[in-house]
Each structure stands twice: as structure tokens, then as C-alpha cells.
Image (spheres, rainbow, N blue to C red):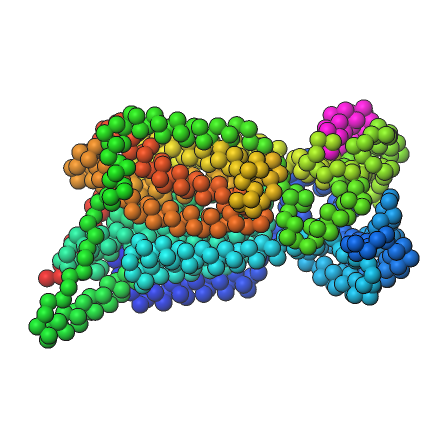
Amino acid sequence: MTNLPVRMARWSAGHPWRAIVGWILFVTLCLGAGIAAGTNQAATEDYRVGEAGRGEAVAAEGGLQQRPVERVLITAPPGSGPLDTAAADAAAKDVAARMGGLPEVRSVAAPVRSADGSAVRVDITMEGPELSGKKHVDPLLAQTAEVQRANPGLRVEEVGSPSISKGVEKLRGDDLARTEMIALPVTLITLLVVFSSLVMALVPLLLALTSIAAAIGLSALASHVFPDAGVGTNVILLIGLAVGVDYTLFYLKREREERAKAQGTLTPQAVVELAAATSGRAVVLSGFAVAVSSATLFLADDVIFSSIAVGAIVVTLVAVVSSLTVLPALLVKLVRRSERRAARKAARAAERGTTPKAKKQRTPGAGRFTAAVLRPVAKYPAAALTLTLAALLALAAPALGMKLTDMGRDTHSRDIVAMRTFDRLNAAFPELKSMHQVLVRADAGRSPEVTAALTALGQEFEGDPRTTGTPKVSTSKDKRISMLQIQVPHYVHTEAAQSALKDIRDTYIPRTVGEIEGAQTAVTGDVARYNDYPTHQKEKLPMIIAALLLVTFAMTVWAFRSVVLGLVGILLNLLSSAASLGVLVLVFQNTWAEGVLDFTSTGTIGSRVPLFLFVILFGLSMDYQVFVISRIREAVLSGVPTRKAIIDGIGSSAAVVTGAAAVMVTVFASFAALHLIEMKQIGFVLTVAVLLDAFVIRMLLLPALMLLLGEANWWPSRPSRAKADTPDLAPRPLQNVN
């Protein structure tokens, strides 16, 4: 692990043009292969989880599965008075005639008038599985627009899962484009502040962008094994820009430091090798930690998290490869270019008989702000530890009241045109808000018995305000699968919808179809999906957190040969994660921040957010952990006392950690500006987590804890023994300029 980055850097620095051209070819090949292979999108069956998923599978087995449905809503224009029923009926007939002739349409239902007579709707069932509707909905939307143009005295609009999904996809794309327009310039400005050089600032950004391009191509190939749920590209952009810039930043800063220390006595190749032996090793460890941490998402048994895992793993590993291969080549070329410019400048100065102005070198070590923060921590570590720990626990306290839910359709932004139609449709036809579906699989000979039992179950809801309409029983052609569908005039998150689901599962099924010998039952539908997905996540969360803790511990022990530091890593990650979740709950489960962050509170947190936070934060925090502790251990191995090594190591790495954190915060905060509430929550909580991790954990809690532990930090190894066991960081003599 120690020698690999050095060997790669040595070759790259010795053959810079080969390395640069090779990287360009690699990126082009990955992107081209991905485009040629295409992306394998997740199918409906890939999303099934819990009892609701089992019910969907049974329904599909009997040909009773949900299909993509669009609804055309006909109402009076705002402020125009009552609906012209004759004109509405004529428009409905026109809609039915137009839709019926489309190859994308399976069937068109008869027009339905609302109870108050204010609206007419036409239901159109599309061909194909439920999730494929958004790909083929454009012809339907075009026909609806034609009907609207032909009836200016009416409001004719269309809504359904396909058109809503299409609207969400467009909004997400627009948001991401805007995010890139914000994140890239701000990242460049941040890097300009760090390096004071446009060329050096562009290097991390270009490597990150090329890594993202290669990762997008590779993820398309990977989707043929792990289907893409439509979030892979988002994750690659989110993680790729952050880690891609960070890894390059670690390497560049160390190369600059070693070059300044050498004062011209070493060749550019030799300086690059020194940087590879230190920061290069930290990059490999950090990237491996992020990849392994992300891989724990496969334990969630969820296609969405599998897509996230693939995107995070691929882009992280590609970013590591770029920093170890093409980056040394670029550094050598840039340094040689800088040396040539300096030589020309010196020659011109000599001709004029003047002395060229020496370039001001930054003094290594802690900056003024960092020194001011570390000074009281070094003097009173116990007090610093106590106060910081108390503050983090106070921030974490609101997380105890966290309410997890699946962010369903009704939580989507009303900036999506289809969602405004969705609201008007549900106001006119409340029975469409949600539904329960009870599936039964039994021998074909028991079909009459099953039908009777399902009918009896439906009768349990007679007069119950939690449901509406007449329950409908459907049976498959082979008589083995039967389904009872009950309409619910309440949104899926309401107590009425959820309590009815509980009664069906716990009370009504056992005393009706549950008494049929050999019958297998499952409840699915909108309400069950909403209920079962968060439950599935809660069940998987402890196992994944346990795996993350084990990975964090093992990686830290492996990197630093210290059980104590492994336990410290676990503690710090848990504290930063818990505090971040507490802030998330404080902001998003309440309404006080709605105007500031431009959202409407659902009083809940998206069920995917905590799991995403734990996995990504545990991986990314290893960046800082490995980089900071590597500097401390490096000093200890060179004979510096542990106390001084801790202060100097944290002080000297503070500028890099701060710069890396600023880049990550820029990227994550731009995602907090998205309209989709779950993406907004993810962007916000990651922003908070990185800020806490970089400025509170690494500058206050970590030094205080390590100072109190002293020599125990390295248990069971000892610095002297560790030094003897550590391979030479520079495996061959470095060439001297002279």
C-alpha cells in the first residue's frame, strides 16, 4: 500500500505525456463504452420491498398488476363560473376518441363526473409496466393539449404517475444544471484562494470532471448487473466533484510543501515521489474507505441504494486512479513550465542588472486562526472535550424525535405543472387519493370461497369514513389469484389511511381470507407501499450501521496499527452523524426554516436520508481522518513527541482540510437548493455533517481526545516499533538536482 503510489507516481512523472494521453484515452473509452452499452433502467419488480412488494409480485403473477394510468381532468377556467356540462361532455368524447387511437394506450374508460358536478375526468390506461409510462406519455400529453386548444372555454389538463414522473425528472435535470452552474465557479474560486494560481486551481477541477465522465460511462456498464434506479448520475456528480477535488487537493498541497522544503535541491520527479509516499498513500486509503463504506449499501436490499452504491464506488475509485496516475504527470509538466518561466525571468533580470523578486513562500504549519483555536484546546484538553461533546450531544438530541416516511407523490414540488393538476384532481375526486389492494393466492378450486371472503372483507368498511365507494374484487384467468381493491379518500400519510391498513392486516384478513386453508395473502397498494418502505429501511439500518462501524474500525486499525484510534474513529463518526441528523430534524420537521430554505415541511424526514448520510459521511470522514492522523503519525515516527506531533499535525493539515471541506460544502449545499424535498434534505444534512466534521470534530474534539490519550493513541503498537516496521516511504534514492 505504501509503495504502490510511489511506483505509479514514478512511472507517471517519468513518462508524463504517456500518462496524460493514457488518461484521456481511458476516460474516452469508459464514456464511449457506457454510451454504446446504454443504461439498464430498473424495472417495476426491482423496487418491490416488504409485504407490499410481495403483494405486487402476486398481482403481476395473475395479470392484475397496476399499469400506468393518465387522467384527463376537465374543469371550468378560474373565475369563469360553473362548468359548462355540455362542452365538458363533448371535450371528454374528443379526448376518448383521440386517446383510443394511440398505440401507447391500452384502454380508455368512460367519462366520470365529480360528485359536485364541477369536473369531468377520463381515465386512460397505458400499455406496458407501471414504470415505463413516463417514456411514452408525450403523445398523450400532446393530444390533451390539442383538446385544450379546441376548447378555450374549458380547462383541459392531464395528470398521472407517468406525467408526474416526467415532470419530476425534468425538474431534477433543471436543478442539477443550475447546481453545476453554481458549484463549479464557487469550487474554482475556493481553489484559487487555496493555491493563488489559476493553473493549479484548474487541475483539481479538470481531474474531478474527467473522473465524473469516466464514472458515468462505467456506471452505465455496471447497470447491466445492478439496474439503475435513476439516481446514479446524481450520486456521481455529488460524490465525484467532492472526492475528486479533495484527493487532488491533498496531493497538490503536499507536493507544494515538499517542493518548498527542498528549496530546489530535488528534481520535480523526486518531489512528486515524496508526495506520493505520504499524501498518495492517504488518498488510496481514503478512497478505499469510501468505496468499502459505500458497498455496505448493498445490504439494504433496495435497488435505489444499490444504484447509489455503484455510483459512489465507481466515481471514488476512478478519482483515486486519476490522482495516482495522471496527476503526477501534470505536476511534473507544470513544475517544469514554472521553472522555465523562472529561468527566463532571471535571465531578463540579469540582462537589466537587477535581481528578480523572490516568490513569497507560505510558512508551513498552523495558520493564525487554527493556532488560535488549538491553543486553548492544547492547554485545557479535558474542558475542550467536555464542552464540545456536550454541544454535539445537544445538537443530536432532536434526532430522538425523528419521523421517517417515504416521500410520496404528494410531497413533490408544486413547481411541477402535473402536481398542480394532481391537487385539483384529488379535490374533485378524493377517492383517487390512495387505495388498498388485498391479494390472495389459492388453489383455483377455492376461487368462489376466496371471492366470498374478500367480499366480506370489503363489507367490513361499509360506512367507514376511512374508505369510499364499493370495493372491487378481480380474479385472474386461471382463478388462482384474486384481488380486492378499496379506494381511500385520504392521502397515504394520514392517520385514517394508515389505521385502515393496520386493521386490514391485523384484524380483517385473519377473520376472512385468513381462515381459508392454504391461502397466501398480502396487502399492497399506495398506502402499503408508503408504510412498508420506511419499515424496510428501519429494519436494515442497524445492520448497515454495524457494518459501517466494523469497516471504519478495521480500516483505521489497518492504516495506523492502533485499536485505540479505530475506536476513536467510530466515536467521532457516530457523534458527527447524530449531530447532523439532529440539526436536520430541527430544520425539516418544523416550519421555522421553510422561508429560508424554500420548502414546505412534511413534518417528516425521507426514509432514505439517514442511511445515505451514515454511509457517505462515514466514508468521506475517513478522508480527513486518514489525512490528519497520517501527518501526526508521520511526525511521531520521525521522533517527535506525541503531544507536539498532535498539535503540529493538526495545525499543518488544517489548511488542506479546510479547503477540502469548503469544496464539499459548496457541492452539497448546492444540492440543498433543489426542489425535491428528499434531495434537499440530503444536500442539507451532508453540508452540516461536513462542517461539523471539519471544524468541530477535527479541530476541537480530535485533538482534545488524542492529547488526553497521549501515548495510548498507538496501542497496541508503539511509535518506536511502528517506525521499525514501516517500509521506507521512498524506496530508492531521490535524484538530486546537482
User: Where 673 falls versus 377 (above or below)?
Assistant: below
Residue under the image location 21 percent in, 37 percent down: 645
Q: Which is more toward the observer, 607 or 438? A: 607
Q: Quadrant of the C terminus?
A: bottom left
Tell me which residue sits at (51%, 30%) in the image: 399
Q: Nearer the viewer, residue 287 or 241?
A: 241
Measured as percent of width and height from the top left, residue 594 is found at 56, 42
Residue 91, percent from left and from top: 86, 60
Is 116 in front, or is 425?
A: 116
Q: Quadrant of residue 371?
A: top left
Query: In the rendered image of this protein, does residue 125 appear above or below residue 202?
Result: above
Residue 565 location in percent, x, y? 32, 32
Q: Quadrant of residue 10?
A: bottom left
Residue 262 point in image, percent of width and height: 16, 54
Quarter assignment of residue 339: bottom left
Residue 18 visible within the image: yes
Region of the chain picked out in magenta, as a range: 497-521
Depth order, front residue of 85/382: 85
Q: Is residue 298 visible?
A: no
Question: What is the tally of numbered marks visible in this picture?
Answer: 0
Tell me if residue 534 comes above or below residue 97 in the rendering: above
Q: Residue at x 82, y 59 (%)?
A: 154
Q: Main SS type for the magenta part?
A: helix
- Taking 640 as reference, is 665 left or right? right
Q: Is residue 488 left or right of 626 when viewed as pictured?
A: right
Q: Residue furthest right?
A: 86
Is 286 magenta? The answer is: no
Residue at 53% from the left image edge and 45% from the top image edge: 597
Q: Residue furthest bottom?
A: 351
